[in-house]
Amino acid sequence: MNIDHIKISRILNKITSHQDADSYVVCWVQNGVKGIEINKTLYKNVSNAVFFLNTSYEWKIIKNDSTTSSGIVLFIPKDILNHPTFNKLHITEVRLFSNNEIPKINLSPGIETRIQSIFEMLDELISTNLKHREEAIVSLLNTFFIYCDGKCNIKSVISDNNSKSALVYKFKKTMDKRISEYHRVSEYASILNVSDKYLNECVNSVLGVSAKSLITEQLVMRSRYALKFTDKSFKEIAFELGFSSPDYFSSFCKAQMGISPTQLRNS
């Protein structure tokens, strides 16, 4: 396994293209991209998505301009996926890099900053000779795959115009922005102009969980972060997250995490 052949580059030029018979490619496309051309077919509306490309694909990313970065391209030597660390990952079992279709994953808004941090740490490690460097790089790749494979993200294929996936992504994006205002499925359904039943049906079809469970998961994540990494009072956190009272917030924490806000903050 040759860790030194891992490469990370930013999408800066108007056209980014490279083909390597020995490396898989992960393209994380952010903003300012006109489209991605794969095997001479141009796909548009690809912002905020991760693409997994095997060695047989000819590809190029076409930008609107070349003034700012529009994402990151990660080159992974093929033999690295044979590392035992990746054996149990679903993302390896389905062999995303050798699929006949072109897998696309729309990242949940809250996951983007974590992915950015992973790529930054990978790039830093690749350029050093630190002790245990290989283990750290494999661990970061593993973390990246886990995030991509998680239920927070929406998997599809690049040619897929699935209306259910599109609705679920809108729901998750709206939830990320307005979770402090709305905690009910019916409120998000109203914003998205669909029925509660249809929104739940779409979320369950795409992600295999209920819409309510995603709302709860988001509240749990934000509650844990605020309690462990800020000095805000329980009252401040409760009202900022849209709970009607500190007592209700405390009951939510106990019900969903099994411990009180005080216990979580002191743990």
Image (tube, rainbow, N blue to C red):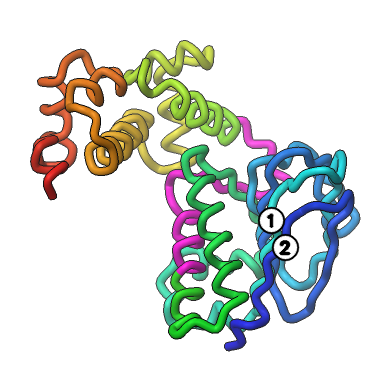
Q: Which badge, 2 or 1, is on the more N-terminal residue?
A: 2
Question: Image check: 5 left or right of 185?
Answer: right
Tag shown at residue 18: none
> Could you tell me if the residues under marks 2 and 1 are in contact, i.e. CB atoms within 8 Å?
yes
| Percent of width and height locating residue 202 | 48, 31
Question: Image check: 74 left or right of 206?
Answer: right
Q: Residue furthest bottom?
A: 1
| Percent of width and height locating residue 263 | 9, 42
Element type at marker 1? strand
Q: Depth check: 77 or 105 in front?
A: 77
Element type at marker 2? strand
* Dot 1 alpha-carbon crowd within 10 angstroms: few under 14, some 14 to 19, many 20 or more: some
Q: Quadrant of residue 162?
A: top right
Residue type of the residue flagged with mark 2 = Ser
Tag shown at residue 72: 1
Question: Image check: 65 left or right of 27?
Answer: right
Q: Depth check: 91 or 248 in front?
A: 248
Which residue bears the numbered disc 2?
Answer: 9
Range covered by the magenta-colored residues: 140-163
Q: Quadrant of residue 220?
A: top left
Image vertical order of residue 54 relative to residue 200, above or below: below
Q: Residue at x 68, y 44 (%)?
A: 30
